[in-house]
Image: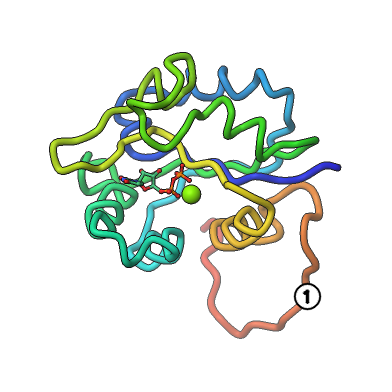
Protein backbone atom coordinates (compact mmCIF):
# COMPACT_ATOMS: atom_id res chain seq x y z
CA UNK A 1 0.00 0.00 0.00
CA UNK A 2 1.23 3.47 -0.84
CA UNK A 3 1.86 5.65 2.18
CA UNK A 4 3.32 9.12 2.78
CA UNK A 5 6.12 10.13 5.11
CA UNK A 6 7.29 13.56 6.24
CA UNK A 7 10.97 14.35 5.84
CA UNK A 8 12.64 17.46 7.20
CA UNK A 9 16.18 18.47 6.38
CA UNK A 10 16.99 20.07 9.71
CA UNK A 11 19.07 23.27 10.09
CA UNK A 12 22.37 21.37 10.55
CA UNK A 13 21.78 19.61 7.23
CA UNK A 14 21.20 22.95 5.50
CA UNK A 15 24.18 24.68 7.13
CA UNK A 16 26.44 21.80 6.11
CA UNK A 17 25.12 22.01 2.50
CA UNK A 18 23.87 18.45 2.68
CA UNK A 19 20.61 18.94 0.76
CA UNK A 20 21.96 17.38 -2.44
CA UNK A 21 23.54 14.46 -0.63
CA UNK A 22 20.38 13.77 1.36
CA UNK A 23 18.15 13.91 -1.73
CA UNK A 24 20.54 11.60 -3.59
CA UNK A 25 20.49 9.09 -0.74
CA UNK A 26 16.69 9.29 -0.53
CA UNK A 27 16.37 8.69 -4.28
CA UNK A 28 17.57 5.12 -3.61
CA UNK A 29 14.10 4.47 -2.22
CA UNK A 30 12.48 5.10 -5.65
CA UNK A 31 9.70 6.91 -3.79
CA UNK A 32 7.85 9.86 -5.30
CA UNK A 33 8.30 13.39 -3.92
CA UNK A 34 4.77 14.79 -3.68
CA UNK A 35 5.48 18.02 -1.76
CA UNK A 36 8.52 20.18 -0.97
CA UNK A 37 9.15 23.65 0.44
CA UNK A 38 11.42 25.76 2.63
CA UNK A 39 9.88 26.69 5.98
CA UNK A 40 10.84 29.29 8.56
CA UNK A 41 10.01 27.36 11.72
CA UNK A 42 7.99 29.20 14.34
CA UNK A 43 8.22 28.38 18.01
CA UNK A 44 4.67 27.03 17.91
CA UNK A 45 5.39 24.76 14.92
CA UNK A 46 8.57 23.38 16.50
CA UNK A 47 6.81 22.67 19.79
CA UNK A 48 3.84 21.05 18.07
CA UNK A 49 6.09 18.91 15.88
CA UNK A 50 7.95 17.51 18.89
CA UNK A 51 4.92 17.57 21.20
CA UNK A 52 5.42 13.96 22.34
CA UNK A 53 8.90 14.83 23.68
CA UNK A 54 7.86 17.86 25.72
CA UNK A 55 8.74 16.23 29.07
CA UNK A 56 12.24 15.20 28.00
CA UNK A 57 15.21 17.05 29.53
CA UNK A 58 16.51 17.93 26.06
CA UNK A 59 13.20 19.43 24.83
CA UNK A 60 14.30 23.08 25.13
CA UNK A 61 17.50 22.51 23.17
CA UNK A 62 15.62 20.38 20.63
CA UNK A 63 13.20 23.24 19.94
CA UNK A 64 16.12 25.66 19.49
CA UNK A 65 17.72 23.13 17.14
CA UNK A 66 14.64 22.71 14.94
CA UNK A 67 14.08 26.48 14.84
CA UNK A 68 17.66 26.92 13.64
CA UNK A 69 18.80 28.90 16.66
CA UNK A 70 21.80 26.62 17.14
CA UNK A 71 22.94 27.22 13.56
CA UNK A 72 21.90 30.78 12.74
CA UNK A 73 19.86 29.31 9.92
CA UNK A 74 16.18 29.67 10.73
CA UNK A 75 14.72 27.33 8.15
CA UNK A 76 14.21 23.70 7.30
CA UNK A 77 13.33 21.92 4.06
CA UNK A 78 10.07 20.00 4.41
CA UNK A 79 9.08 17.24 2.00
CA UNK A 80 6.54 14.48 1.64
CA UNK A 81 7.73 11.25 0.04
CA UNK A 82 5.09 8.78 -1.09
CA UNK A 83 5.00 5.13 -2.11
CA UNK A 84 5.08 1.51 -1.02
CA UNK A 85 6.55 1.13 2.48
CA UNK A 86 7.74 4.76 2.43
CA UNK A 87 8.02 5.15 6.20
CA UNK A 88 10.28 2.13 6.74
CA UNK A 89 12.33 2.75 3.59
CA UNK A 90 13.17 6.32 4.64
CA UNK A 91 13.86 5.39 8.27
CA UNK A 92 16.27 2.71 7.02
CA UNK A 93 18.30 5.16 4.94
CA UNK A 94 18.06 7.82 7.69
CA UNK A 95 19.52 5.53 10.36
CA UNK A 96 18.64 5.36 14.06
CA UNK A 97 18.12 8.48 16.19
CA UNK A 98 21.55 8.56 17.87
CA UNK A 99 24.06 9.42 15.11
CA UNK A 100 26.83 7.56 16.92
CA UNK A 101 24.76 4.39 16.94
CA UNK A 102 23.48 4.85 13.41
CA UNK A 103 24.86 2.62 10.69
CA UNK A 104 27.83 4.51 9.26
CA UNK A 105 26.41 4.43 5.74
CA UNK A 106 23.06 5.88 6.85
CA UNK A 107 22.42 9.63 6.54
CA UNK A 108 22.57 10.15 10.30
CA UNK A 109 25.60 7.86 10.69
CA UNK A 110 27.44 9.66 7.90
CA UNK A 111 26.59 13.27 8.70
CA UNK A 112 25.18 13.50 12.25
CA UNK A 113 26.88 14.45 15.50
CA UNK A 114 26.10 14.85 19.19
CA UNK A 115 26.65 18.36 20.54
CA UNK A 116 28.40 19.04 23.84
CA UNK A 117 24.94 19.91 25.23
CA UNK A 118 23.78 16.43 24.28
CA UNK A 119 21.48 17.23 21.34
CA UNK A 120 21.56 14.68 18.55
CA UNK A 121 22.09 16.78 15.44
CA UNK A 122 21.02 14.08 13.06
CA UNK A 123 20.39 16.01 9.83
CA UNK A 124 16.92 14.77 8.99
CA UNK A 125 13.56 14.03 10.51
CA UNK A 126 11.54 11.12 9.14
CA UNK A 127 8.08 10.03 10.33
CA UNK A 128 8.00 6.88 12.49
CA UNK A 129 4.60 5.41 11.66
CA UNK A 130 1.35 6.09 9.76
CA UNK A 131 -0.29 8.09 12.56
CA UNK A 132 2.77 10.27 13.10
CA UNK A 133 3.07 10.80 9.36
CA UNK A 134 -0.53 12.00 9.15
CA UNK A 135 -0.20 14.32 12.14
CA UNK A 136 3.10 15.74 10.93
CA UNK A 137 2.12 16.19 7.28
CA UNK A 138 -1.05 18.07 8.33
CA UNK A 139 1.10 20.26 10.54
CA UNK A 140 3.62 21.22 7.87
CA UNK A 141 1.54 21.29 4.68
CA UNK A 142 -1.79 22.61 3.46
CA UNK A 143 -3.77 20.19 1.25
CA UNK A 144 -3.12 22.23 -1.93
CA UNK A 145 0.64 22.03 -1.41
CA UNK A 146 0.64 18.24 -1.89
CA UNK A 147 0.14 16.89 -5.41
CA UNK A 148 -1.74 13.74 -4.37
CA UNK A 149 -4.86 13.45 -2.21
CA UNK A 150 -3.67 11.96 1.06
CA UNK A 151 -6.38 12.80 3.59
CA UNK A 152 -10.00 14.00 3.48
CA UNK A 153 -10.40 17.75 3.02
CA UNK A 154 -13.22 20.25 3.43
CA UNK A 155 -13.93 23.70 2.02
CA UNK A 156 -14.15 26.67 4.36
CA UNK A 157 -14.83 30.30 3.40
CA UNK A 158 -12.32 32.70 4.83
CA UNK A 159 -12.60 36.45 4.99
CA UNK A 160 -8.92 37.02 5.54
CA UNK A 161 -6.51 39.07 3.43
CA UNK A 162 -4.21 36.99 1.31
CA UNK A 163 -0.81 38.09 0.04
CA UNK A 164 -0.64 37.90 -3.78
CA UNK A 165 1.96 39.05 -6.32
CA UNK A 166 1.82 42.84 -6.87
N1 LIG B 1 16.90 13.72 20.40
C1 LIG B 1 17.99 14.11 21.17
N2 LIG B 1 18.36 13.31 22.23
C2 LIG B 1 17.72 12.17 22.52
C3 LIG B 1 16.62 11.78 21.75
C4 LIG B 1 16.24 12.57 20.68
O1 LIG B 1 18.60 15.15 20.90
O2 LIG B 1 18.12 11.48 23.50
C5 LIG B 1 16.48 14.58 19.26
C6 LIG B 1 17.00 14.09 17.91
O3 LIG B 1 17.32 15.22 17.12
C7 LIG B 1 15.80 13.34 17.37
C8 LIG B 1 14.65 14.18 17.89
O4 LIG B 1 15.07 14.58 19.19
O5 LIG B 1 15.83 13.25 15.96
C9 LIG B 1 13.33 13.45 17.99
O6 LIG B 1 13.48 12.29 18.80
P1 LIG B 1 12.79 10.91 18.39
O7 LIG B 1 12.92 10.02 19.58
O8 LIG B 1 11.44 11.17 17.83
O9 LIG B 1 13.79 10.35 17.26
P2 LIG B 1 13.60 10.24 15.67
O10 LIG B 1 12.18 9.85 15.40
O11 LIG B 1 13.97 11.58 15.07
O12 LIG B 1 14.58 9.16 15.26
MG1 LIG C 1 10.37 10.68 16.07
Q: Tell me where residue 32 sits by quadrant.
A: top right
Q: Tell me where residue 59 sits by quadrant.
A: bottom left
Give how far across and how far down residue 36 sits, in percent. 59, 41
Give how far across and how far down residue 5 sits, in percent. 65, 44
Task: Judge from the rendering whether residue 116 lies leftward or rightward of residue 43; answer left or right.
Answer: left
Give how far across and how far down residue 118 sits, in percent. 20, 42
Residue lying at the far left of the rendered structure: 116
Classify the position of the N terminus by image quarter: top right
> Depth check: 128 or 159 in front?
128
Q: Tell me where residue 99 sits by quadrant.
A: top left
- Seen at 71% across and 57% down, the residue is 144
Give how far across and how far down residue 14 sits, in percent. 36, 32
Residue wearing tag 1: 154
Residue lying at the far front of the rendered structure: 101
- Seen at 73% across and 29% down, the residue is 31
> Depth check: 51 or 80 in front?
51
> Depth check: 95 or 14 in front?
95
Display coloring:
rainbow
Above or below, comparing residue 67 to residue 42 in the picture = above
Above or below, comparing residue 3 to residue 27 in the picture = below
Task: Judge from the rendering whether residue 76 lies leftward or rightward of residue 33; answer left or right.
Answer: left
Amino acid sequence: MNEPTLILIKPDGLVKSLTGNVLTRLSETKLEIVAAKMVKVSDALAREHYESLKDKPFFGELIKYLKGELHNRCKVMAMVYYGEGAIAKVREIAGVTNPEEANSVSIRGQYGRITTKGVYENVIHASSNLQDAQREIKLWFRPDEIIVDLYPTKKVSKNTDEKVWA
